[in-house]
Image: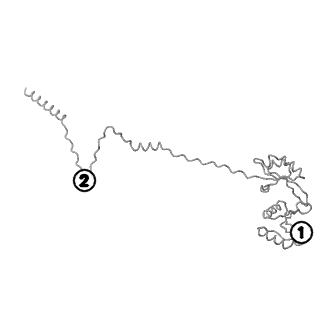
Amino acid sequence: MLTRALIVVLVLLNISVALWWALRVEPATPEPTPPSGVATLQLAPVEPGHARLPDAPAALVDATTLTEPPSAPESPSVSAPAAPPRCVALGPFADPAAAATVQARLGGVLERMRAVEEQQAAGGSNARYRVLLPPAASREAAQETVQRIVAAGLGDYYIIAQGPEANAIALGQYRNREGAERRVTALRAAGFKPLLQGGGEATSTWWVQGALVAGQAANAARQRSGAAQQRSLDCARLR
């Protein structure tokens, strides 16, 4: 009987110890004391009704997404420069009537047309063209004209001393007429009145000169005119 009572007491003691251990309160861990002279950080409580600030990374992402680079300005269109005018001479034709017929035929192909007489010297490739100033009244007058020629920057001249052309001023001799005409043009621009002469007996031919209408070709103009030859022409000569 005594043994049974001791066993009951021991069981009750064990149960009491187990309950005490399970229900015991752990002692609070003391907060570490900061060293002296160091400030502590305290979080302020969030009050209701205040909006929460967005996170910085999200704001940066939104700004990057919404901001678009400015478009490059369009460069102004530059129109192509107009093609320079082209001028031609078509011929030769036997007389002014034939040249006039060709002019009527070339309407719409050439503009600023004119018929020009040219003298073809006898002798073919051996022909020469001379440019000269008419004989002066005296040798002294011819020398004064020479001084004016030099002052104008022109060369290639001499005074003819005797013969029917005495005191005339020769200003060059040329194999082809185009070279002689360029010389005549330069002298006229300087204020002189030169003569153009062909060597030997000359025969007159006529040429139609004009500026090509925009979009027209020189070969088409020659075919329509029926001319045997076609020459390039300085458009300044048509003014």
For image coordinates 90% across by 56% down, the residue present is 204
What residue is shown with label 2?
Answer: 37
Q: Quadrant of the C terminus?
A: bottom right
Residues 39 and 18: in front is: 39
Percent position of residue 55, x then y: 38, 42
* Residue 82 drawn above or below residue 199: above
What's under tag 2, amino acid-wise? Gly
x and y, in percent, of residue 61 in the image = 44, 43
| Quarter of the image where the N terminus is located | top left
Badge 2 or badge 1: first in the primary sequence = 2
Q: Is residue 34 left or right of residue 73?
A: left
Point out the residue furthest to the right here: 201
* Of the pair 189 and 201, the residue shown nearer to us: 189
Q: Which residue appears at 11% of the width and 30% of the height? A: 9
Query: Disc 2 to disc 1, how far (Cα)?
Result: 126 Å
- The quarter of the picture where residue 158 lies is bottom right
Against 194, residue 19 (above or below) is above
In the shown orientation, is residue 95 left or right of residue 62?
A: right
